[in-house]
Amino acid sequence: MIHVVGHTAVDHISKVHHLPLPNQSTHITDRQVFFGGGAANIAAGIATLGESVTLHSCVGDDFRGSEYEKWMDRLGVSRQFFEVPGTHTPTAFMFTDETGSQMTFFEWGASKAFATSEAPALPLVHMATADPEFNCRVAEKSEFVSFDPGQDVFWYTKEQLESIIGNADILFANQHEVQQMCTTLNVTREALIREVSMAIFTMSGEGSMLYAGGKEHFVPAVPVTLCDPTGAGDSYRAGFLSAYVRGYDPLTCCRIGTVTASYVVEHAGCQTHLPTWTQMHERYREHFGTPEPVPSRG
């Protein structure tokens, strides 16, 4: 069982010609509403790949009986939700320009309850964007910890990052998040990597880097026709974690994450084009060959 902690949200995804400077405007060329939230995206991806997953999140009065709840039921996502009366489920407003650069405005809504909620002790947990202090408490109490600060990285203090990274087994981040963590912690990229057993840094369409066992490995992106980059990182994590609990080596897990992400970016929305394990496996063979067999557990 994989546990995922963080936001469940409704995504309003818009395309714009360019991201405006302060006090300027831009034209929205397309706007759609989708199911989202970093943790929910990861949980949905894991469930679609066929692994058992429990999502720990906060939702408002509007979630029970909603189409989003029915969608999670169909996917088979188990849920441990803090239902917060008098609030609504968090909402994200994302704007992507023609170069793929993105800007997000996030309304926390019910997720404010993370700050005062009891943190669970979990055997294997991935922590996505959520309240920093809550994530710190989860990391302290759990056995195996995967951490992804996401765009909330700017909200973490030096002390919070030191605490959570000190308890983390795997660190996921993109280039911007790596830079911000290094700035907050006042460390080099190399020093940050040494703090965890395994680090995976994604680089948008340029691929990703795996750092483990004192070695580094480059994983190229799978070339596809890009529709929307939103959710690529979440689906990468879903693929990696699903492969990891099946016993695949870290490099293969990264490749599986890359292939999983390649499906999601072909369509708008973070949960609209999630692959099954069979679909992922077919595309994996096309680009990386047959995956190395899972080592015998003896």
Image: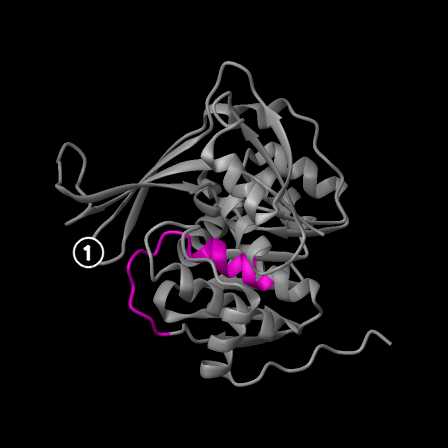
Say whether residue 8 is visible.
Answer: no
Residue that badge 1 annotates:
98
x, y percent for residue 255: 52, 73
x, y percent for residue 55: 62, 41
Q: What is the secondary structure assignment of the residue under circle 1?
A: loop
Q: Mark 1 Cα within 10 Å, few/some/many (few <14, many 20+)? A: few
* 151 in magenta: no
x, y percent for residue 188: 51, 59
Q: Residue furthest bottom?
A: 289
Q: Quadrant of the C terminus?
A: bottom right
Instruction: Identify the amino acid type marked 1.
Output: Glu
> In the image, what residue occupies the spot 53% across and 35% down?
69
Question: In terms of depth relative to the viewer, which is nearer, 73 or 265?
Answer: 73
Question: In terms of depth relative to the viewer, which is nearer, 52 or 87?
Answer: 52
The correct choice, above or below, for 246 with respect to 135 in the image is: below
* 230 in magenta: yes
The correct choice, above or below, for 128 with respect to 273 in the image is: above
Q: How many marks?
A: 1
Say whether residue 72 is visible.
Answer: yes
Read off the magenta span.
Answer: 223-240
Q: Quadrant of residue 99?
A: bottom left
The correct choice, above or below, for 227 with respect to 150 in the image is: below
The correct choice, above or below, for 153 with respect to 146 in the image is: above
Q: Residue furthest top?
A: 86
> In the image, what residue occupies the spot 55% across and 62% down?
239
Q: Is residue 31 left or right of residue 277?
A: left
> In the image, what residue occupies the spot 54% across and 74% down?
281
